Image (cartoon, rainbow, N blue to C red):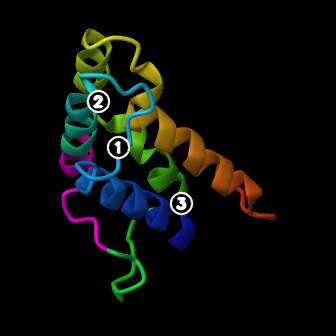
Amino acid sequence: MFLILDLYWQELCKLRVSNTTRVCTVGGTNGTKCDAINLGGMYQRFPDLQDPRNNKKSCRNSVMCMAKAPAAIPDVCGALIRKFGEHQLCAVGLRLTNKAAALAQAVHGLELNA
């Protein structure tokens, strides 16, 4: 669970400082808008997300629930990003869902369908 929460936290941190280091992979004049939309989606989906290294509270969600959580980032983020050009790969929901699933599958013996 820590790895998945840390993945989300690191992404949120990158998006928060995207004025100095762009997260958008396409770039161009709409790169800042792309990052801003993704940051808004992250804040909307994970309003209480904290650094898992400093947070001693236990997460009440299952690993499966947390691995699928970014998929619930509103589709409007993806739609707005597409409006600015070919930014589909920048959409934070899809990226994090794929990375979290890969992390969960990499843990030997972890069964997510239980």
**Horizontal and vertical percent position of residue 10:** 41, 62
Q: Are marks 1 and 3 in contact (CB under 8 Å)?
A: no
Q: Label 3 amino acid?
A: Val
**Residue 42, position as x, y percentages in the image:** 27, 47
Residue at label 3? 63
Q: For label 3, count other residues whose C-alpha is less than 10 Å away and answer few (under 14), some (14-19) or many (20+).
A: many
Instruction: Determine if the magenta segment contains residue 73.
Output: no
Q: Tag 2: Cα neighbours inside 10 Å, few (<14), some, or many (≥20)?
A: many
Q: Secondary structure at mark 3?
A: helix
Q: Which mark is residue 22?
A: 1
| Residue that numbered label 2 is attached to | 31
Q: Is residue 21 above or below residue 63?
A: above
Mark 3 or mark 1, which is nearer the start of the sequence? 1
Task: Say what amino acid the circle numbered 2 marks.
Answer: Gly
The Cα–Cα distance between marks 2 and 1, rounded to whole angstroms, is 7 Å
Q: Residue at x 45, y 32 (%)?
A: 25
Q: Are marks 2 and 1 in contact (CB under 8 Å)?
A: yes
How far apart, in angstroms, are the residues tagged by discs 1 and 3? 29 Å
Residue 109, numbered circle: none
Front residue of this view, candidates 69 and 10 = 10
**Residue 81 rendering spot, x and y as whole percentages:** 29, 20
Eye-nearest disc, 1 or 3: 1
Which corner quadrant of the image does residue 108 belong to?
A: bottom right
The stretch of residues the image draws in magenta is: 41-50
Circle nearer the viewer, 2 or 3: 2
Q: Disc 1 residue type?
A: Arg
